[in-house]
Image (cartoon, helix red, strand yellow):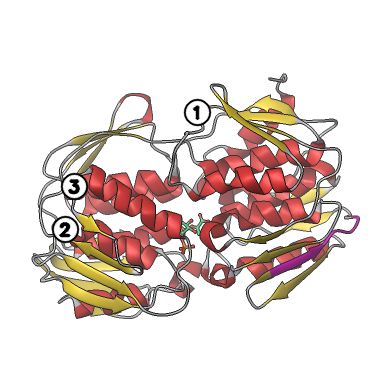
Amino acid sequence: MTQPWPAPTADGPVRAVVRVPGSKSITNRALLLAALADGPAVLRTPLRSRDTELMARALRTLGVGVADGPAGAWSVAPGPLRGPAEVDCGLAGTVMRFVPPAAALAEGTMRFDGDARARERPMSTVLDALRALGAEVDGDRLPFTLHGRGGLPGGEVAIDASASSQFVSGLLLSGARFERGLVVRHEGGALPSLPHIEMTVEMLRAQGVEVDDGEPNTWRVAPGPVKARDWDIEPDLSNATPFLAAAAVTGGEVTVPGWPTTTTQAGDAIRGILADMGCVVERDERGLTVRGPERLAGLDVDLHDVGELTPTVAALAALADGPSRLRGIAHLRGHETDRLAALAAEVNGLGGDVAETADGLVVRPRPLRAGGWRAYADHRMATAGAIVGLVVPGVEVDDIGATSKTIPDFPARWTAMLGAEGP
Ligand SMILES: O=C(O)C1=C[C@@H](OP(=O)(O)O)[C@@H](O)[C@H](O)C1
Ligand SMILES: C=C(OP(=O)(O)O)C(=O)O
């Protein structure tokens, strides 16, 4: 049982420069692509957290060399993938959806499992697709077993990826290594998190893979080698958002160095969201700087493309001056926890007024009081509690350790921000 974490309250406007570690989404794609590539590669400034260590471990169990290099770098030595293997996916969507298509290239029996909640996360779309592409898989969700035959015919498959963009990304990442390549068609409701699919396509192209995404909802990956290359991993922009939110809710100023000028990271959308809420947002050679307003405005926003920002945006909305509506995020019910239910329950538990809708949240700010904030093993629920605790004294997050999924040492980084001298 972990001790509840008393969220520190800011005693004035937060002024700090906060460096954030590498992007989870880029790190886990780079690891997987390095494992499938035609030569060794180095990943510099990768994220080292539970989700990425799980990816590294999964690849090692499949016979890939993933070794520590200087300053947290990873050196990856690919080789033929091989079973048998036991793969622990933890609670990482990127591990449970990206590794099985690669594992289908290996020979042997591979058993996949994960945390209790991971067994509830949507998975059957990927496994059905693999079966349609020629793989033998027992099961429809974690735990499941893949009987690898040392290769996969590949070809064309239609899937409904409205529950997660990771279904598409996972197939695309390995598609060039299937004998006939891969054509994926999405047929179903609107596809969430499109920037994440663009990230997949861009990274594949950067490794010499031919991807045609010219037709809406269709991706064609030509069969061929994945060319080895090194990566410098960008900072994780979604993980930067709680720190930027600290400036927004206290009328302070926070700078995150190294903010890329062009990126496929969904987290970049925080710039527009914070500006709409009344913050001054500037990107220059120092990085991204956010200055909080005296009063934060509510907003009406479609977060379909950037669902992983929802916990931060909901926390901001609960502390704003007027009501907000967050839309387009029904798929968040299948994330680390049902994030719509969790956000409503936790803000309301402090005296707030958050209502769930079919595809989002309506947030009517009310004065909040001290109380417990449950994390539900969800890193972003935990950081949302930290944001609220900055201005509401007496908020206690039950499991701040959940942040280790994607942010190592979050409590220390948060207190360092509060103790830091201004930019
Ligand atoms: O491909 C990725 O790296 C991710 C895709 C998104 O998943 P969904 O499409 O399931 O929301 C995002 O929310 C998740 O944090 C990371
Ligand atoms: C949805 C998320 O994670 P995962 O990669 O486990 O799906 C997230 O980080 O917000």
Question: Is the residue indicated by label 1 positioned so its CB lies within 8 Å of ligand 1?
Answer: no
Q: To which quarter of the image does residue 152 belong? A: bottom left
Please report the residue visible at 47 percent of the width from the left and 34 percent of the height from the top. 260
Callout 3 crowding tier (Cα within 10 Å): few <14, some 14–19, many ≥20: many
Residue 344, percent from left and from top: 74, 67
Name the quadrant of the C terminus: top right
Q: Which mark is residue 83?
A: none
- Where residue 197 sits: x, y (%)? 38, 58
Q: Is residue 393 above or below residue 146?
A: above
Residue picked out by circle 1:
258
Label 2–label 3 contact, CB within 8 A: no
Distance between the alpha carbons at the discs numbered 3 and 1: 31 Å
Which residue does the image show at 82% across and 51% down from the upper left?
A: 320
Residue drawn at point x = 53 percent, y = 34 percent: 20
Looking at the rendered structure, the kind of residue marked 1 is Gly
The local secondary structure at tag 3 comes to: loop
What amino acid type should be assigned to the residue bearing mark 3? Val
**Magenta-drawn stretch contains 394:** no
Q: Is residue 88 visible?
A: no
Which residue lies under the disc numbered 3? 64
Question: Is disc 2 surrounded by few (<14), some (14 to 19) or many (20+) residues within 10 Å?
Answer: many
Relative side of 201 to 177, left or right: right
Name the residue nearer the viewer: 253 or 299: 299
Q: Which residue is tagged 2? A: 176
For label 1, the SS is loop
Q: Position of residue 59 (x, y in %)?
A: 25, 51
266 in relation to 98, above or below: above
